Image (cartoon, rainbow, N blue to C red):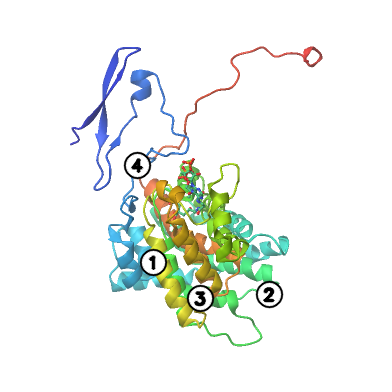
Amino acid sequence: MNTKTFELSNPATGVKTGLPVRSGTIGPDVIDIGSITKDHGVFTFDPAFGVTASCESKITYIDGDKGILLYRGYPVEQLAAKSSFMEVAYLLLHGELPNESQLQGFVTSISRHTMINESLLRFFNGFHHNAHPMAMVSAVVGSMSAFYHDSMDINNPRHREIFSHRIIAKIPTIAAAAHKHAQGQPFIYPRNDLDYCSNMLNMFFAVPCEPYRVDPVAAQALDLLFILHADHEQNASTSTVRLAGSTGANPYSAISAGVSALWGPAHGGANEAVLSMLEQIGSVDNIPKYLAMAKDKNSHFKLMGFGHRVYKNFDPRAKIIREMCYKVLEKLGRADNPLFELALRLEEIALKDEYFVARKLYPNVDFYSGIIYSALNIPRSMFTVMFAIARTVGWVSHWLEMIGDPSMRIGRPRQLYTGPTLRDYTAIDKRG
Ligand code: SDX
């Protein structure tokens, strides 16, 4: 039983209330402002949700000051070192690590749902050859709602489970189809004898005219990146999925909205932008010039892959990916990677710069991930798609948590209106 309250008094009306304070299992308390409009006649104002908890969740916890990230209580470092993407997906969806038979059942179900409807496959021919893959993925994921009328009752737990397995299984196939369309190569069907990431690499890089062998180093690297990208509590794309889903819209539409939100360069699109930025910087000598631009408020240039709304310390995922770069580049025989060298120097110089120190701007998850994707021969325009594949697990977990909550209501923010006050319509001949 919660007994803490936060005293609020409005001198204008003399009304005093004790707002209930809610405590999570860890992290700061939150003030439940639900009664504030009824009691005080005001709304709260927090445009970018900087200090607002939009929901209750049991999935992921971040301590941004300490640089801690937990999935269902497990530190991401432990999961990265010991787990697999499929196991982490099960954990995020179900709340507990699976036993062997649960994991086997889950993996089998995912591998049985990897094909996409042939009609859906033909959608890709409608896109121009240089369409951005995120545009294709968002459109095709949204279109999946046109194919599964028989299993889209959001109030039916079995339908929700079928949806969640379908989308997790098919999103690599959709991504690969987008890639093949951009390359002008024939689509490669999924192979259910391969693990999740090996199958993805096979669909990306195999061609019908010669054998292709998936490099296990590449598959492992991808699996690790997918673990690190799988969830990140109420980030912009996950919040978009929740908001779209709160209307009762079908879940494919909600995930498609999430893909679109992820695309922006302030969010998942930053991994693509980091590589373009590193190429633009070109050499260590140019770093001061670009840092000056990043600090200049009259310039639109930002240091991509730097800064985070929640982390005011190292993003733990960036640390892991930086270490991974050394190992993966070495194993792939690409240890001499000028862009990685440049990224390391950029990080070193920025972290000593007063502007970045004062604002606690550190490398985030997107800073180093593109270096690994490039080493795996994944084209730059596909980087954010890779993020979307992994994050689909997080989006689905949050959608399931929200839909399963009996107290769910449509998400509907309020506003501070600053437009014209009431005025009468003027006939066109009377307007100046
Ligand atoms: C992801 O939310 C998540 O969890 C997202 C994510 C996930 O897993 O889902 O972690 C994935 O989206 C990572 C972020 C990828 N984006 C980028 O790398 C783009 C570059 N970074 C920024 O644009 C920015 O840091 C954000 C968008 C990430 C965070 O924006 P905030 O929280 O609104 O930060 P802010 O604008 O309030 O910044 C505070 C100050 C400002 O300066 P002042 O006005 O106080 O003088 O820091 C400055 C900002 O201008 N600043 C930067 C900067 N990031 C912030 N200055 C230069 N370069 C930057 N990158």
**Category of crowding for the residue at label 3, using alpha-carbon neighbours closer than 10 angstroms: few (below 14), some (14–19), many (at least 20):** many
Numbered badge on residue 199: 3
Given the current orientation, which residue lies at the most extreme right position? 429
The residue singled out by tag 1 in the image is 320
Residue 16: percent from left, percent from top:
27, 18
Q: Is 134 situated above or below 411?
A: below
**Category of crowding for the residue at label 1, using alpha-carbon neighbours closer than 10 angstroms: few (below 14), some (14–19), many (at least 20):** some
Question: Residue 112: in sight, yes or no?
Answer: yes
Q: Ligand 1 within 8 A of label 4's CB?
A: no
What secondary structure is marked by label 4? loop
Question: Residue 166: in sight, yes or no?
Answer: no
Mark pair 3, 1: CA separation: 24 Å
Discs 1, 4 touching: Cβ within 8 Å: no
Which marked residue is nearer to the observer: mark 4 or mark 2?
2
Q: Quadrant of residue 95?
A: bottom left
Q: Is 316 situated above or below 39?
A: below
- Identity, as a three-letter code, of the amino acid under mark 1: Ile
Pick the residue in front: 39 or 269. 269
Residue at 77% x, 14% y: name it. 427
The residue singled out by tag 2 in the image is 185
Pick the residue in front: 301 or 25. 301
Discs 2, 1 touching: Cβ within 8 Å: no
- Identity, as a three-letter code, of the amino acid under mark 4: Pro
The residue singled out by tag 4 in the image is 406
- Identity, as a three-letter code, of the amino acid under mark 2: Gln
